[in-house]
Image (spheres, coloured by chain):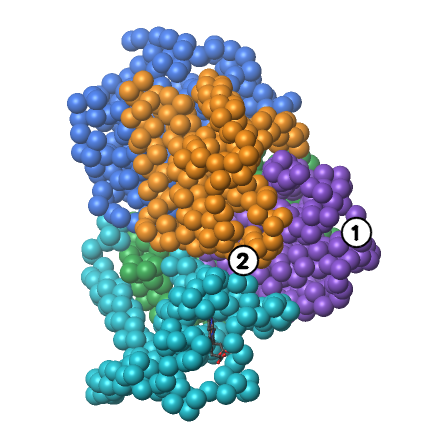
Chain colours: A cyan, B green, C purple, D orange, E blue
């Protein structure tokens, strides 16, 4: 297990560079949009990675509510944080792309709105964890995560009617994509997922260390001889 | 004599500070325990743990033969430092509301009567219409005790019931408590006025720095060692 | 189950009595929404056509903000003297407390709406071109949506620092679909341009989902310390 | 007088410390502003011509909401454990307390405005056709007006035994000139159709009058029990 | 010996209920008075009136030779049932703020030192970073006493300083108070634990139903009559 981390790190590095090569050099230039379109290879994988991380957060939160397992809680925390980062990447690359292509930064379109709401929900999740003064932050956070996950389908339906400007889904949407573009996209997605996993893992280890540290301090207090009284502690 | 409360290896941490540091002990049913100790020894924390109000870091509590505290909380009376009463309502109105929470009328006694009875038991006047927020500190303290007695609990957890109460009334409270004990209740009284319970309490439990350091039935003996 | 209903009634009666004595919540809500109506009517020189188009948004933003102001005070009363602990040690089911609070807030906000609606109608010269009977339905469903989640998150923000600002932070993201549905449904009814049916169904679905979720999870939040 | 200044600073520092234990607070305020703007744009389609026309009003409703959230907790902290009594038995002048609270709220609301304004500009595509440099002046004067009155009346409603429903209704007419001036001035600057000079002078006069009146009367309010 | 406090015909009504019913008396400077009485006798109301916190219905108070209480409030220390402290700040932070209110540093002593000194005087640790809201009840009570002592007041009004405090610490507090009395302060202590002050208080003042019913320097004598 100890060995796995550097291996994953190296693999991610290699994948990311290869994917960048694919995206910037190998993939053909889009006819109407030109080179701006290459942002596609960062825009879409970051969204997909974020969605996956949020899904893991939901599952981990449910597990926490049932089992009260500290590991599940840490997993939920980590996936929410990293998911928000990837979601931000998508939300930033989108407007950068939109400005030259559509002529506007933002529009209230189905996909855009959904992403924004998701981002808002998980930021509020992180804010709650930061501001909690309770000894049971994990519990409150898990409850909020469940509420957030329940909200997503409702958001989806509520913006169903919005006039859409955004391209239809690649998968199952009937759009035809050049196979080389497909290739570059999938490689990028794989690289992003590995990268996401890597960041999550480090963050997870950091969280484990932090909690261990707190526990050690408290344990030392437990072992303290009785004579050093609580009244002066 | 059966054990009413069994506590094993109780640890309660607030962040990095441990308020309870491994408390393991048993309390027999039908006895009056005085819990004594310096400020910050962990008495209130222990009581809150017994009342099921605070999630434990480690350890377990078994009460009236079950570890599911939720299922026995109808048998519990809890009195805390704050009054646990609505300042804007009169004493009767407060108790009437709590009587509904405990569904006392289902047990065959009329709400109204029961409330008036407990208020009289703590030597207050049930017809007082003043809101509790305007009571004097000692009156509020007694009303708070009345609230804890309301559901005729098997186990009573009282956190400093005598503080702010005048001496004569405190003595009357002790009489009331010994009466309840003789009727088979298990009573825990946290107090700094141990002398009041001399002769009344069956056992004195001393706490220090989150642990129980001694249990004795003779107050004089322990105050010496202190 | 009957016990939940009975206790809900008892708690609700207690809350209404206390609110009647202090008038905290209704006061601040009323004050705030009056200000909002006035501000809008200053900045706004409405031809009927235009105002009808944005009235839905105006009304619901005013009510949402007023509700947040009131919801922030819901639990304050239970925290003073830690009365909430008295509830927590009693065998009464947490859901009775939750339902009582929700119904109480629902009543407050509804009273507020009943008082404010005539003002809005007068100030903005409103008249529904669509089926007006749907308006109370939208109002009731929408208010319930705001209030269920608001009460739940207000309970959650009790356990946080800076709790006043925490409530909107938690509530707003989750209530976006409900808000959208309320605004659109109201707009649809007022302009009569399209049917509000879809939005009403969506609102109802939102209410059902979150009422059930809250009832399931409130016990956990209450016992968290 | 120097003692008033010093004590105001000490009290303000204490309040700010309690409020901003960490930079989390600023982040959460940023998030709050974002949420408010997002909520608005869900309620009022910002691309619509009508909603651009009432943007002045919209912006002030958002600011008002932020102010109410802040004002609500101003005195709550002093009431817990009756710390206010500790201030009352000390020789410190009441006005230092009042000024500290007003300035604290002013800072809070101003930070929120500073965060929200760019967001509003982006979302509503606002652009001042009149002299834009007047906008911060209007914002500052308007916020001060809101906050002075709000702080004073919040203190008053704490002390009066029976918080009658009349109180906000009495307060209400008093705030109307300020609201009118804020909204009109903002509108004037945004549209550039007429000069905001008159409204700015009115706001300034309002601020001066009510600040002085509050400083004179606050001592009485504080010592009343 | 000059009179530090002169009270004439004090009446305080809450609505129709009179909590003080014509209290007229004098208190000499440099003495320690224990104010005793049943719950609801009006002790807290009297103390609040002396602190200038409550407007009187009738009567007047003259303190340190003036009837303008506002002008002497810098000479006053007041400790109440509630802690009068900010729960979210640590003890030191609280005291530092109150030191500013009393402008202690203008009197030649450094704020920081003075605060640390009083905290040590009540046997707490000035370096404790925990916010006061997380103190145990007794610790909070002591911090509250520290706040009252902060400005080195000539007149100290203490409302039940010993409640919730452990016996040993209470004895230490009494020693502290007698020390202050010997340094020339006038001290009023409302308490229900009169025994603690036996030998320490110069006079015991009994209140009943809003009036002072007896003043004596011998506790034993009065408890008999009670
Ligand atoms: C303005 C902000 C934007 C946001 C927030 C945004 C968001 C998203 C999201 C969340 C996805 C993944 C959703 C999915 O796979 O169903 C996505 C995919 C995609 N986006 Fe965007 N987008 C933005 C702008 C744009 C622009 C301007 C373009 C190009 C004209 C664009 C083109 C695409 C394409 C081609 C996909 C992949 C199609 C798919 O699989 O759905 N996006 N975008
Ligand atoms: N919520 C909390 N967070 C952090 N520390 C706490 C909290 N509650 C209590 N403590 C600490 O735990 C210790 C024990 O507190 P507890 O209230 O149980 O003492 P106690 O024995 O009841 O004292 P007292 O006689 O003064 O009431 C104290 O040092 C206190 O500061
Ligand atoms: N704000 C108030 N409104 C109405 N009545 C009040 C108010 N404050 C106190 N009282 C009443 O005045 C009487 C005296 O109260 P006070 O608090 O002075 O008693 P006390 O002697 O301090 O009692 P204790 O020892 O219990 O603290 C009580 O009957 C009380 O109910
Ligand atoms: Mg305690
Ligand atoms: Mg008293």
Q: Is residue C50 left or right of residue E69?
A: right
Helix, strand or loop for disc 1: loop
Q: Is residue C165 above or below residue D135?
A: below
Q: Is residue E105 above or below residue C101?
A: above
| Residue at screen point 38% across, 90% down | A180
> Of residues D220 and B185, which is closer to you in this image?
D220
Badge 1: few (under 14), some or many (20 or more) residues near its Cα, within 10 Å?
some
Subunit of label 1: C
Mark number displayed over residue A210: none
Mark number displayed over residue C128: 1
| Residue at screen point 65% across, 66% down | C206
Where does label 2 land, which residue? Answer: C171
Q: Position of residue D115 (x, y in %)?
A: 41, 48
Q: Quadrant of residue B27?
A: bottom left
> Of residues D186 and B31, which is closer to you in this image?
D186
| Residue at screen point 36% across, 85% down | A28
**Is label 2 within 8 A of ligand 1 (CB to nearest ligand atom)?**
no
Helix, strand or loop for disc 2: helix
> Of residues E6 and A36, which is closer to you in this image?
A36
The residues tagged by marks 1 and 2 sit, at their Cα atoms, a distance apart of 30 Å
């Amino acid at each position: 297990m100890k060995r796995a981390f550097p291996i994953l790190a190296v693999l991610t590095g290699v994948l990311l560079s290869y994917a960048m090569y694919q995206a910037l050099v190998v993939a053909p230039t889009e006819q109407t949009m030109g080179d701006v379109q290459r942002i596609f290879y960062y825009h879409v994988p970051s969204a997909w990675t974020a969605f996956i991380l949020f899904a893991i957060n939901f599952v981990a939160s449910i597990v926490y509510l049932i089992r009260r397992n500290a590991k599940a809680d840490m997993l939920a925390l980590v996936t929410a944080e990293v998911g928000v980062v990837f979601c931000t990447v998508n939300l930033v690359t989108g407007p950068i792309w939109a400005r030259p292509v559509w002529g506007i930064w933002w529009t209230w379109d189905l996909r855009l709105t959904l992403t924004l709401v998701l981002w808002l929900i998980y930021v509020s999740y992180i804010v709650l964890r930061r501001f909690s003064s309770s000894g049971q932050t994990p519990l409150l956070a898990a409850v909020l995560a469940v509420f957030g996950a329940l909200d997503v389908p409702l958001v989806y339906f509520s913006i169903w009617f919005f006039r859409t400007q955004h391209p239809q889904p690649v998968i199952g949407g009937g759009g035809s994509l050049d196979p080389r573009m497909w290739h570059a996209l999938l490689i990028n997605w794989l690289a992003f997922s590995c990268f996401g996993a890597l960041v999550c893992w480090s963050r997870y280890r950091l969280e484990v260390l932090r909690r261990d540290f707190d526990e050690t301090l408290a344990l030392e207090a437990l072992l303290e001889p009785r004579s050093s009284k609580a009244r002066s502690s | 004599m059966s054990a009413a409360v069994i506590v094993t290896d109780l640890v309660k941490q607030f962040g990095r500070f441990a308020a309870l540091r491994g408390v393991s002990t048993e309390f027999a049913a039908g006895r009056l325990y005085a819990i004594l100790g310096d400020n910050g020894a962990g008495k209130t924390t222990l009581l809150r743990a017994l009342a099921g109000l605070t999630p434990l870091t480690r350890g377990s509590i078994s009460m009236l033969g079950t570890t599911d505290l939720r299922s026995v909380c109808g048998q519990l009376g809890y009195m805390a430092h704050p009054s646990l009463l609505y300042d804007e309502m009169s004493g009767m109105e407060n108790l009437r509301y709590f009587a509904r929470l405990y569904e006392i009328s289902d047990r065959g006694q009329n709400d109204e009567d029961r409330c008036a009875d407990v208020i009289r038991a703590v030597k207050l006047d049930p017809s007082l219409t003043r809101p509790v927020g305007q009571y004097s500190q000692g009156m509020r303290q007694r009303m708070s005790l009345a609230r804890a007695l309301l559901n005729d609990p098997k186990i009573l957890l009282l956190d400093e019931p005598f503080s702010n109460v005048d001496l004569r009334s405190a003595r009357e409270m002790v009489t009331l408590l010994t009466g309840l004990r003789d009727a088979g209740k298990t009573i825990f009284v946290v107090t700094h006025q141990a002398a009041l319970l001399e002769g009344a309490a069956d056992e004195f439990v001393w706490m220090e720095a989150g642990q129980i350091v001694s249990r004795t039935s003779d107050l004089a003996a322990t105050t010496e060692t202190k | 189950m009957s016990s939940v209903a009975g206790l809900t009634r008892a708690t609700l009666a207690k809350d209404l009595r206390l609110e009647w004595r202090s008038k905290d919540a209704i006061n601040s809500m009323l004050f705030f929404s009056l200000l909002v109506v006035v501000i809008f009517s200053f900045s706004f020189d409405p031809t009927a056509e235009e105002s009808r188009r944005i009235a839905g948004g105006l009304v619901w933003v005013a009510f949402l903000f007023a509700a947040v102001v009131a919801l922030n005070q819901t639990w304050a009363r239970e925290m003073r003297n830690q009365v909430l602990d008295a509830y927590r040690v009693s065998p009464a089911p947490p859901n009775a407390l939750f339902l009582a609070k929700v119904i109480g807030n629902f009543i407050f906000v509804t009273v507020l709406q009943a008082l404010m609606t005539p003002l809005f109608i007068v100030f903005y010269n409103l008249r529904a071109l669509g089926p007006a009977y749907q308006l109370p339905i939208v109002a009731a469903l929408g208010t319930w949506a705001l209030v269920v989640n608001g009460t739940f998150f207000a309970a959650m923000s009790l356990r946080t620092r800076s709790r006043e600002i925490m409530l909107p932070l938690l509530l707003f993201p989750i209530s976006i679909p409900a808000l959208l549905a309320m605004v659109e449904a109201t707009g649809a009814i007022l302009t009569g341009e399209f049917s509000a049916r879809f939005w009403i169904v969506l609102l109802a679905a939102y209410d059902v989902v979150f009422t059930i979720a809250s009832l399931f999870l409130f016990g956990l939040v209450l016992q968290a310390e």
